[in-house]
Image (cartoon, grey):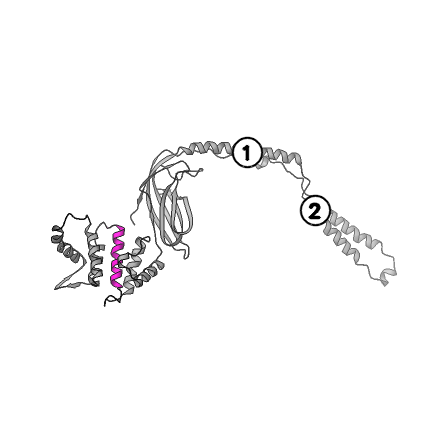
Amino acid sequence: MTAPVQIGWFNVRPLALAALVLLSGTTLHAQQPAATGDSPAQDLITRAKEALNNLNYAMASELGKAVLTQPRLRSEQRVAAMQVVAAAYFPNPDDGEGVILPDSALHYLHLAARIRPDLPLATDIRWPGLDSLFRVARDRTFAAIAIPPDESSLVGTEGRSYLEVISTRPAIVRVLTAPRGSSQFLLHDSTGPAERARMGLRAHDGRQALLTIGEHTMLIEVTDAKSSSRDTLRFRVEVEGDVAPILAQLPVLDSSAMLPERQPRKLGAGIVGAIFFGGATVALAQFARAREPIPSAFPADGRARVIALLLAAGGVVGGLADKGVPLPGNSAANTILRAQHAAAVRDVEDTNRLATSSYRLSIRILAEAP
């Protein structure tokens, strides 16, 4: 509960205070020209700032809180009221003897940054200390908002409906949609780290329809590039227009029809030859030795085994290095087959491109209740 504020001999809470302030101004407004059209909430914000300028911090705080109890507030009004309350909790010590409550001020600045990360601190309440506290609040807060168009039209694969995404810190943004009730989300657009991003919605990507007639759920995933914290914004998309075209399947190249363009390498022959010549070298060296008593008196010459190993290794390496003899006839046939396949793919792509070029949708984007 909000503590009561002493005004004369009255103890009133924010709602009663708001009513009292508005009632007290009725006579004055009646004596002046036509009203400016300000809402009661805007009038309270103005009076809260006047109290702040008059160093009446308790009055400024309670008036700002009274604004937050008003129905149907615009986000700008809510943020303005929160900033005034924060300023009342964190007054400039050079201006008077107000009580400084930095934690309470940070709380309201944090809430304001979550609601509208794009709004700076109001110039008429700024002072260096509050500026620093505002930067601290934004550094500790990761939040994002999206500003989509109410209605737009999409045509073909090139048409775009753009929306702006704003975050308190550089973030990675992705825009996805899925038919209402489905979990199969399709990607429309993505971007790297930035505090402001202009994202596009598409009707078709050339391969499949990204939006079709009916209701869709749009998710905007905003991921903090530094901490990986994620803020997900949800919107409802109402789609009207054409039925999605049925596209022809792209032809697939039949790999079984491709001919070998080189003869197989002769690895087996190389290994067999290595074994034969290596073994033959060892056998020949053994056969060529003198008879007894010479072999018993002198050890065998080990160079024959080294030569045998080198011959065997050479045969294996030769087999591995063999890439096979080119077959020019087969290569020419494969070139013709690839060219025919590429021409068939282009024909189907042209047919699909013509089908999607006239695909037209109109969409309405509505924010979902949190």
Q: Residue at x 79, y 57 (%)?
A: 303
Q: Is residue 1 visible?
A: no
Kind of residue indicated by mark 2: Gly
Bounds of the magenta span?
73-90
- Please provide percent x and percent y for residue 97: 23, 68
- Residue 152, magenta (yes or no): no
Kind of residue indicated by mark 1: His
Please give the count of numbered marks on the rendered protein: 2
- Please provide percent x and percent y for residue 59: 19, 61
**Residue under label 2:** 319
Q: Is residue 266 visible?
A: yes
**Residue under label 1:** 341
Q: Residue at x 63, y 34 (%)?
A: 332
Secondary structure mainly formed by the magenta segment: helix
**Element on which disc 1 rests:** helix
**CA–CA distance in space, label 2 to label 1:** 35 Å
